[in-house]
Image: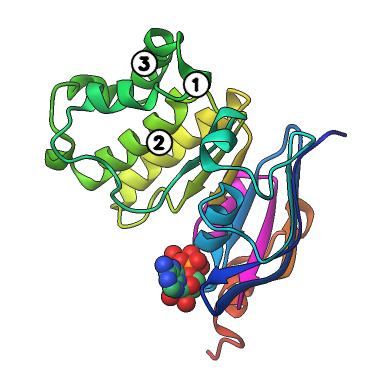
Amino acid sequence: MERLLEVTDLSAGYGAVTVLRGVDIHLDAGESIGLFGPNGHGKTTLLKTISGLIRPTAGAIRFSGNDITKARPSNIVNAGLIHSPQGNTLFGDMQVHETLELASIAKRAKGGSRKNLKSVFELFPRLEERRTQKARTLSGGERQMLSIGCALMCVPKLLMLDEPTLGLSPRLKKELAAAVGDIAKSGVPLVVVEQDVEFLMALTDRLYMIEHGEVVREIDKANAPDHEEVMKLYFGEVSH
Ligand SMILES: Nc1ncnc2c1ncn2[C@@H]1O[C@H](COP(=O)(O)OP(=O)(O)OP(=O)(O)O)[C@@H](O)[C@H]1O
């Protein structure tokens, strides 16, 4: 099976602070993976390092057969590895359709913007209804949809989503999860960071638990933990 993403012995951090220590993860063609673990233990740092925003201090990253360890973020985007970051990274004064069109300036997206816009609006009808609304006036969930929409405008070969449902109400979380599920079903492999293991297990094929910047556990559907085990993973022994 072709290996789409291979991260080997990766270390990275911020200045003198090491966050990731010897991380090994991989994703085969046709599968999606999830990353979970406590807050502040390196999941976002891992996505940023894969997408070239942080230079690793050791290790290697291969995407679609090419070494991208030292590649520029723009070249990584053009290779089809697209990162939808955590939090609000949109331009507040830009309208929904302008924001999506701007995302099409990536070299690989040029030419297909009308078709891509149509599929983003099919996936997120709420965005089409608000096409001329400014990003800053959108709700948290709508902003999240717009952010994912921007990533889709770049026609990902692999899409990395950092906590797409962070801060959303249960109803919106369900709506967004269904849309992300549709993205996966359409054949786009995903790397999803989320705290919610059950949510991740429903959406992806395999999970890695990241703790203190290291992969401490790999989980697949066959050994998926139940709710109590998940609590133990996060908090140690659970007393009743
Ligand atoms: N720009 C930065 N400069 C210095 N330290 C940083 C920077 N960004 C993150 N860190 C630190 O790196 C560590 C890992 O953060 P990271 O955001 O990767 O964790 P995370 O697992 O994604 O957490 P969360 O689930 O809260 O998003 C934390 O201790 C954080 O404070």
Mark 1 or mark 3, earlier in chain: 1
At label 1, counting other C-alpha atoms closer than 10 Å, the crowd grade (few under 14, some 14-19, many 20 or more) is few
Mark 2 or mark 1, earlier in chain: 1
Identify the residue shown where x is 14% and y is 42%.
Answer: 136
The mark found on residue 148 in the picture is 2
Residue 1 lies left or right of residue 131; in this view the side is: right
- Rendered-image quadrant of the N terminus: top right
The mark found on residue 107 in the picture is 1
Q: Are marks 3 and 2 in contact (CB under 8 Å)?
A: no
Cβ of disc 2 within 8 Å of ligand 1? no
Provide the residue span drawn in magenta: 193-214
Identify the residue shown where x is 55% and y is 53%.
Answer: 47
Camera-side mark, 2 or 1: 1
Q: How many marks?
A: 3
Callout 3 secondary element: helix
Question: x and y percent of residue 172 in the render?
Answer: 31, 44
Residue 131 lies left or right of residue 157; in this view the side is: left
Which residue type carries mark 2? Answer: Ile
Q: Name which quarter of the figure residue 30 lies in.
A: top right
Question: x and y percent of residue 97 in the render?
Answer: 24, 21
